[in-house]
């Protein structure tokens, strides 16, 4: 979660994006990196830290509703999944800048009070 471009986004570190069943999808690259970081193997990682949405692995939630790796901050920050690294500079905002305002209702770090053209330009620059 980048805190660059503070005029349109500045992470408040509230953890709201780490809570709720939204489905933090994992790529094969994410899976390997996280398993290595927590010093386990891929099979054990998938069995103990993931659920499946259809055939796609997603991070499990703890009983408190937060991501299994949330503990007042992201405990796997250096290897957090692409989805977490990219937020909120994501492709769907380039498709429709209106998504930026929708996302702002879920993320207090997003400044929704900026013109669509500025949002599109910033997101295009920050897309990873
Ligand atoms: S919801 Fe937004 S402001 Fe809160 S931690 Fe996530 S990215 Fe940061
Ligand atoms: S991996 Fe880290 S940033 Fe991503 S949802 Fe879990 S705690 Fe949040």
Image (spheres, helix red, strand yellow):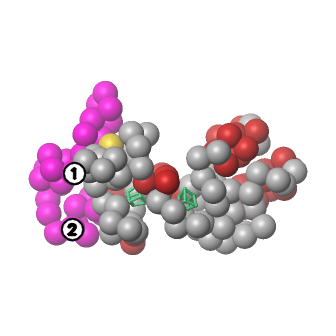
Q: Give the residue drawn at x 38%, y 68%.
A: 72
**Dot 2 lies on which element?**
loop
Residue at the far front in the pictured view:
64
Drawn side of residue 81 relative to residue 98, left or right = left
Q: Nearer the viewer, residue 73 or 95?
A: 73
Residue 68 appears in the rendering: yes
Q: Is residue 100 above or below residue 53?
A: below
Say which quadrant the N terminus sits in. Answer: bottom right
Q: Name the residue: 34% across, 47% down.
A: 65
Magenta part of the chain: 32-57
Q: Is residue 124 left or right of residue 69?
A: right
Q: Position of residue 116 (x, y in %)?
A: 84, 47
State the image quarter where residue 18 is shown.
Answer: bottom left
Residue 42 painted magenta: yes
Q: Which residue is mark 1?
A: 49
In the picture of the structure, the residue carrying the numbered disc 2 is 38
Tell me if residue 22 comes above or below residue 111 in the rendering: above
Whether residue 38 appears in magenta in the rendering, the answer is yes
113 shown above or below 10: above
Residue 45 in percent (x, y) is at: 18, 54
- Point out the image quarter for the C terminus: bottom right
Q: Name the residue: 51% across, 62% down.
A: 14
């Amino acid at each position: 979660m980048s805190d660059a471009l503070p005029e349109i986004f500045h992470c408040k570190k509230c953890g709201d994006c780490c809570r709720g069943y939204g489905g933090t999808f994992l790529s094969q690259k994410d899976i390997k990196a996280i398993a290595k970081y927590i010093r386990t193997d891929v099979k054990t990682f998938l069995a103990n830290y993931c659920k499946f949405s259809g055939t796609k692995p997603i991070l499990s939630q703890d009983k408190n509703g937060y991501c299994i790796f949330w503990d007042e901050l992201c405990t796997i920050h250096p290897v957090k999944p692409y989805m977490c690294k990219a937020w909120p500079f994501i492709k769907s905002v380039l498709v429709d800048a209106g998504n930026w305002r929708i996302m702002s209702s879920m993320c207090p770090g997003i400044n929704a009070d900026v013109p669509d053209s500025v949002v599109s330009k910033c997101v295009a620059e920050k897309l990873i």
